[in-house]
Amino acid sequence: MAEIPVDKQTTGAWIIHHGRKVAADVRGAAEFSAIDLAAKAASLLARLGESDQATLSAQQVTAAAKIGNLNPKTEMGACLDHLQKRKLIDRSASGAVSVLGVTGTSALTHATDLFEDNDPQSIERAAITLAELSSQAPISAEGAIDLISDTHKLTKADASDFVQQASQIGFVDAEGEGADRLLFNGNLFRRDIASKTMKVLSSLNSAEQAKLSEFDAKVKANGAIVASEAGALLGETLFSKVRAAALYDMNIVSNEAGDHVFITAPGAFHKFSNPLTEDAFDHAKALVAALSYGMSQSSHVRGRIWSIDLLLGKLIRGGTVGPAPAIGNDYRALELERVVKTEHVGNGFTMRLLKREVGVIALEVLKGRNAAASALETLPSAGMRSYTPPEVARVGLRKTQSATSKAQTRSLLSAVRGGGGL
């Protein structure tokens, strides 16, 4: 059986996704070393880079590694070595690093290249195949074992061990036990109804499968389809099956003309849970939160925002805004992630945007062209010290994680700011 085709960006996204799962597992890094190193190196590259070429001091590089939970004594050096070998960075004798312009998309492509550089094992390639397979539709554990065994030349016993391990680490979600066990992508197929989804899909005849494939392509091409049009394309019988299986999201827009239902594909937003592609959206949500606070609750003394179009427009064009005292407090989470750069000027701070794609997404949200703005939680009165993306909040960690201390936050901010004041 031929391997499921996956493009480089999708492969890179799965590498980042799996790398985060591996990092949370006690033996994960030892068993999936190519995924672990590629994910860490690509994530560090994305954190170091910005839209234009950037040069960071040794102190700033170490801070970026720590913010990404890399050990600066061991893991950071290995990641930098691999990035330099691929000519993605230049390093000076002082430890400073120069990075060419990096976007979320290019970082994913680099993740795939870094993965291939590290001679991945068959089970590491199988991890990507299984993740992509379980994103298309829920699959039985037995079916997954057969496919993985055939595709990656593993014995049935080894394939069975891998599938069990994959669900334990979190490469895929699982439901049920024994022969009835189902594997699926929990971001696309809701837990507790995965078995129902599989039954509905397996019950479709060839004509219905063809209609559904045509409909799926149209949803992906257009982003969203009006429910009435979906009913006309699929027919009421098939459309009712699709709704029952929760294959698509129903989005209701209400206005003076009534309620309007739109169909969207979950995979367009949440397929990978939280790789670098979604990092841009998480960063945009954090930027929206900080800007919203500046517009609605910040006082004139600390720097109230009066025109979001002008402010974000200037940042997206590469300009600097400020000075204002609020900038030094409200954007700390984004500063640590190297989305923005602040400088201490007089009694306030100035700010410029390092990753302009984040500003573009945020502007779309703030101008009302994206429903994500309504999902933002009420902001606290203090400036943001950190930001927890929705996926991290949704999934319970296997063990309690300690929060970054205020002293550590101050230390990292100082390093990111190049020794400037807090």
Image (tube, rainbow, N blue to C red):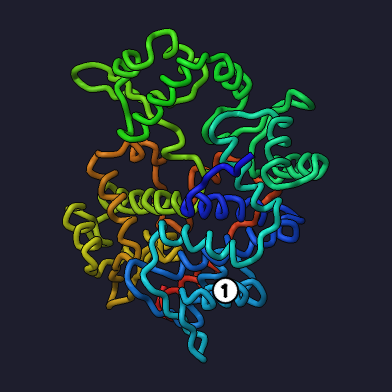
Q: Position of residue 18 (x, y in %)?
A: 61, 51
Q: Nearer the viewer, residue 258 or 153?
A: 153
Q: Is residue 224 left or right of residue 23?
A: left
Numbered label tally: 1
Q: Position of residue 162 (x, y in %)?
A: 75, 44
Residue lying at the far right in this picture: please name it.
157
Q: Where is mark 1, residue-wise? A: 82
- 106 up-or-down from 223: above or below: below
Q: Residue at x 31, y 65 (%)?
A: 353
The quarter of the picture where the N terminus appears is top right
Which residue is found at the position 44% from the left and 51% from the top? Answer: 277
Asked whether residue 210 is in view, the answer is yes
Identify the residue at image location x=52%, y=55%. Answer: 12
Circle 1 SS class: helix
Name the image quarter holding residue 147: top right
Quarter of the rendering containing residue 203: top right
Q: Find residue 372 and report its image quarter.
A: top left
In this view, the residue in front, 203 or 43, is: 203
Q: Is residue 49 left or right of residue 292?
A: right
Lateral position of residue 92 relative to residue 368, left or right: right
Tag 1: Cα neighbours inside 10 Å, few (<14), some, or many (≥20)?
Answer: some
Q: Is residue 365 above or below residue 406?
A: above
Residue 92 picture location, percent across and down? 48, 88
Q: Nearer the viewer, residue 263 or 335?
A: 263
Amino acid at dot 1: His
